[in-house]
């Protein structure tokens, strides 16, 4: 019998999950509480309770080649960094291409998820849904995929800010921010220098009379463009660069020197307590100018609030504030199985979930969390490879370790996470993009084999190792192999450069092309050497 799979949420993770189910011959039904697909990327003027929200000016800080799905490149004419409307259009193109919408029930909320009484043998789940008219319906599914995203429950730590209850102005979470016009002429304090916090501070500063940006530990500010105007993530997220980080301890220090060469973070009040590559940085090329022009003033951590202002830990204060925007992240709730077999979304620690996907305590691995992790890099490819793995587990084509082994790995991860958090190196829900993608890819046999690839196609192996770790790499071999993956890798830079080459130049060869040619010969020679060593190894 074809297994029936319940998918909760029709955002990027949900769409990828539907596609992966179809690829494996499973029958998906997706429930989406909103009126359209796209999840977080569906912009609405009003704030939707229990759903992700974005602001009007949002532009992606990861490039289109890095954040696309592995078998569906974005159109060449799409900009490298996209407005939310363009990315939303891509998700519709994806859904239409693979005919996913017929498996989605919009305006339908999943009310409860409960194990069947015969779960130890069947692994089935009872799903209670409610439609837009309030009509309830109980359904039975063989497996469940949670694809509800990370940015649903704003974390507003008001207890950490004494006096906020007496503040006469307005305060809100960045989740509720939509447009800068509502703060025109006001004095605004933004708490938190994450990507969203800095984006909001920069956006509001265009119309506010003054913006203050409070940061507890400082922040490294990355320009979205690397050398030659190439996207930063395509430069950093490569296997070669990560190998250099492992082999050469000074690479991180060199990166910090380069960031400070652009502007000295200490002089701009942003000097950070942790290394620039040890955790998620903030990507924004507007903040330094806003600071140097005075429209944004950087402050230390808030100690307390008064009726009209704020006191900071360095002894300074700001008065006559009109609004405070908390960019303090989101609370992450993960499912826990209660004694009665029901799932409750409590504050379960993500570290106790096997590879961020499966609950070790379940006797049958028929529940998967998709996209409930924050990679230091793009999210959609991570969600997709999680979904590919989960569907093969549901189908019985890939096995998980036994519960004891899974719990042992979970405990090892707990110890490593404790060390990282004590050193301030990484948040508990962050993972390294390439390491995590490779780890999951290993579970299903789709991690690119560089040695074999170098023997068969040295030029392609060169692109895979030295170039950006684009999602197409995970379609070169194994289950779900895509015939056009190699060509997608060969043409990834063409699609990247197409939207900016809008003026015909008299000379066909650019400086970048000449330098790339030189680099290619060096890297090609390296791959030939690697292939030779491989041949000797097999001999």
Image: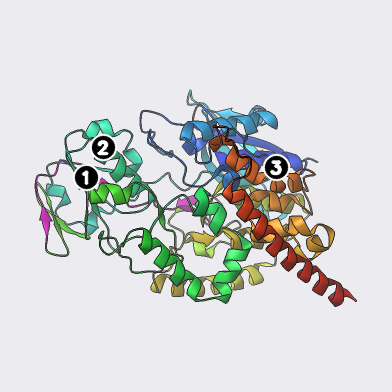
Residue 71, numbered circle = 3
Are discs 1 and 2 less than 8 Å apart at CB? Answer: yes
Distance from disc 1 to disc 2, alpha carbons, whole Å, reads: 8 Å
Identified at 73% across, 39% down, the residue is: 22
Q: Position of residue 270 (x, y in %)?
A: 29, 60
Quadrant containing the C terminus is bottom right
Q: Between residue 68 and residue 459, name the one nearer to us.
A: 459
- Span shown in magenta: 316-345
Quadrant assignment, res 168: top left
Magenta span contains residue 339: yes
- Report the residue marked by disc 1: 295
Q: Is residue 519 visible?
A: yes
Characterize the local packing of mark 1: few (<14), some (14-19) or many (20 or more) Cα atoms within 10 angstroms: many
Compared with 94, 239 (above or below) is: below
Which residue is pictured at 35% across the width and 42% down the height? 175
In the image, which disc is placed on residue 206? 2
Query: Which residue occupies the extreme right position in the image?
Result: 539
Mark toward the start of the polypeptide (3 vs 2): 3
Depth check: give the residue in front, 194 or 46.
Answer: 194
Which residue is found at the position 43% from the left and 68% from the top?
Answer: 425
């Amino acid at each position: 019998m074809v297994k029936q799979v319940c998918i909760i949420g029709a955002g990027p993770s949900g769409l990828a999950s539907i596609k992966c189910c179809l690829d494996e011959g499973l029958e998906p039904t997706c429930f989406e509480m909103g009126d359209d697909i796209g999840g977080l990327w569906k912009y609405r003027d009003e704030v939707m309770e229990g759903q992700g929200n974005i602001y009007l000016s949002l532009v992606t800080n990861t490039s289109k080649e890095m954040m696309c799905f592995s078998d569906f490149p974005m159109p060449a004419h799409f900009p490298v960094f996209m407005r939310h409307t363009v990315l939303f259009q891509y998700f519709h193109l994806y859904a239409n291409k693979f005919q996913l919408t017929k498996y989605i029930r919009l305006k339908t909320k999943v009310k409860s998820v409960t194990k069947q009484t015969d779960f130890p043998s069947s692994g089935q789940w009872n799903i209670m849904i409610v439609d837009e008219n309030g009509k309830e319906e109980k359904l039975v599914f063989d497996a469940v995929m949670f694809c509800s995203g990370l940015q649903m429950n704003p974390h507003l730590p008001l207890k950490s800010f004494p006096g906020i209850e007496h503040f006469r102005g307005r305060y809100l979470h960045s989740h509720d921010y939509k447009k800068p016009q509502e703060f025109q002429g006001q004095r605004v304090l933004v708490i938190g220098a994450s990507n969203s916090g800095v984006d909001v501070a920069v956006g509001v500063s265009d119309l506010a009379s003054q913006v203050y940006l409070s940061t507890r530990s400082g922040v490294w500010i990355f320009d979205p463009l690397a050398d030659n105007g190439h996207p930063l993530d395509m430069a950093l997220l490569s296997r070669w660069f990560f190998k250099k980080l492992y082999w050469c301890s000074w690479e991180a220090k060199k990166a910090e020197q380069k960031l400070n060469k652009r502007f000295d973070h200490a002089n701009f009040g942003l000097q950070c307590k942790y290394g620039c590559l040890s955790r998620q940085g903030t990507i924004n090329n507007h903040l330094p100018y806003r600071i140097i022009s005075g429209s944004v003033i950087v402050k230390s951590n808030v100690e307390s609030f008064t009726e009209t202002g704020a006191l900071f830990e360095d002894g300074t204060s700001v008065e006559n504030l009109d609004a405070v925007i908390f960019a303090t992240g989101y609370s992450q709730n993960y499912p826990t199985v209660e004694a009665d077999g029901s799932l409750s979304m409590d504050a379960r620690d993500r570290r106790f979930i096997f590879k961020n996907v499966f609950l070790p305590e379940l006797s049958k691995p028929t529940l998967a969390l998709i996209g409930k992790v924050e990679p230091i890099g793009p999210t959609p490819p991570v969600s997709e490879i999680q979904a590919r793995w989960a569907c093969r587990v549901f189908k019985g084509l890939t096995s998980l370790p036994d519960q004891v082994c899974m719990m042992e790995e979970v405990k090892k991860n707990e110890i490593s996470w404790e060390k990282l958090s004590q050193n301030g190196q990484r948040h508990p829900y962050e993972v390294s993009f390439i390491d995590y993608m490779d780890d999951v890819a290993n579970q299903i046999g789709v991690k690119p084999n560089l040695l074999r690839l170098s023997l068969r196609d040295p030029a392609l192996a060169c692109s895979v190792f030295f170039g950006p770790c684009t999602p197409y790499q995970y379609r070169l071999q194994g289950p779900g192999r895509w015939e056009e993956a190699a060509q997608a890798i060969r043409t990834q830079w063409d699609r990247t450069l197409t939207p900016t080459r809008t003026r015909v130049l008299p000379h066909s060869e650019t400086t970048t092309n000449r330098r790339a040619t030189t680099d290619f010969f060096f890297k090609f020679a390296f791959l030939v050497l690697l292939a030779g060593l491989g041949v000797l190894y097999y001999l």
